[in-house]
Amino acid sequence: MYTLSFWLLCVSNFLFCASFQMMIPELPDHLTRLGGREYVGLIIALFTLTAGLSRPFSGKITDTVGRVPVMAFGSVVCFLCGFLYPYLLTVGGFLTLRLVHGFSTGTKPTATSAYVADIVPADRRGEAMGMLGLFTAMGMSLGPAIGSWLAESYSLDAMFWTSSAFALLSILILIQMPETLVNTQPFRFGLLKLRKNEIFDRQAIPPFVVLLLQSFSSGVVLTVVAGLSSSLGIANKGLFFSVYTLASLAVRLVFSRSSDRHGRVPVLLISTSVLAVAMATLMFTHSTILFWTAAVLFGMSWGMNSPTITAWTADLSDEATRGRAMATMYIALEAGIGIGAVAAGWLLNRFGMAQGMYVSFGASAGLALLAVGYLVTRPK
């Protein structure tokens, strides 16, 4: 199962995720210095908006032109945007770049998931997605800590340019990767015209609903946790991301085949329940002990959830429309993160830091419990 193509894909994913993730902890303060404090919630929301809007297109292109070209396009966008951040120093310019940057995650992960599903046996998809997720999680774990270190030790510009360099490396790895789609077509602009049945894959509805409810919490965490870190006296605002991702890595290493053996839904019931506990813990966090406990629980939940829900989507999809099914799943991810980020930003501006965080984390815990209820009662 673990071919050279698979390992190259894993390394490329590590570099790609580290690229866009390393700047996340520093962007709220950067936007505030530009004079856009009231738009902090849009940092994640705009990024996820274009990511979500591009999903149906990336799904169709993945199923027609091929997996590799779509992966390469996503890395190119990430490379260009990372390079341009130091030069767009107005609020409008920054927010526009965040909008464009979202095309990167709206394309590459869709094609990557379809590629992995193509090259591994169906009964080992959970394990394969877990291994791919291991590299993804390492990128998302190390990225924020590296970004904050670069910003503190050198400059914000150094962080942006390092982000761009990581994206460039992720492109170079893909150059010689063999295509897995059998009947490829040359790209033409007519492929960007979508019919109604090409926007959304109905077979992916159960994963869509669950991931939409779960990912609200990620939008909240991305928007709020940097402020919570500062209020607790933690200087490196990226450490929460590192701790939760390291916990995610540990879970993936130990339980990578759990959904292959015990089923997708039973594992999702456990992971979503742990997510609810993590967000409830953040509600009442007034000490570093609770803060790090919540980080570990949050990482454990996503360490089980991410590979399982991706494998579940692949199970439910048809081979000919696998890209569309993956795109549908990722639409839920982007929509949930975007809604969570906007809601958290609004709550912080409306009620202040302390009350805004309390309500944001509480809403996240409630939606996670709603996802548990859906998994239990959903139509079979």
Image (tube, rainbow, N blue to C red):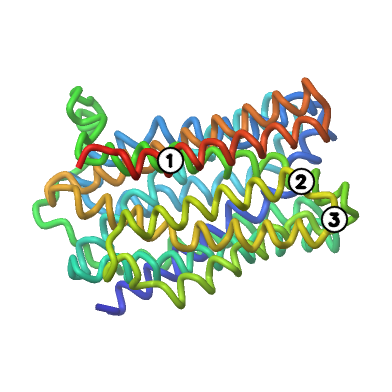
> In the displayed structure, would residue 223 be above or below residue 181?
above
Front position in the image: 379 or 11: 379
Residue found at x 27% / y 61%:
263
Give residue 290's position: percent from left, percent from top.
76, 57
Callout 1 secondary element: helix
Is there a contact, CB below 8 Å, between mark 2 and mark 3?
no
Residue that protrudes farthest toward the left in the picture: 183
Please tell me which residue is depicted at 50% across the width and 52% down the height of the picture: 273
Q: Which residue is mark 1?
A: 371
Question: Quick one: label 1 or label 3, which is nearer the N terminus?
Answer: 3
- Left or right: residue 353 compared with residue 159: right
What residue does disc 2 label?
284
Q: Nearer the viewer, residue 58 or 216?
A: 216
Q: Is residue 196 above or below residue 336?
A: above
Identify the amino acid type marked 3: Ser
| Quarter location, residue 166 | bottom right
Measure how far apart labels 1 and 3 are at the Cα level.
Answer: 29 Å
Quadrant location of residue 310?
bottom left
Q: In whole angstroms, how far apart are the C-alphas of marks 2 and 1?
A: 22 Å
- The amino acid marked with disc number 1 is Ala
Q: CA distance from mark 2 to mark 3?
A: 9 Å
Q: Is residue 322 left or right of residue 81?
A: left
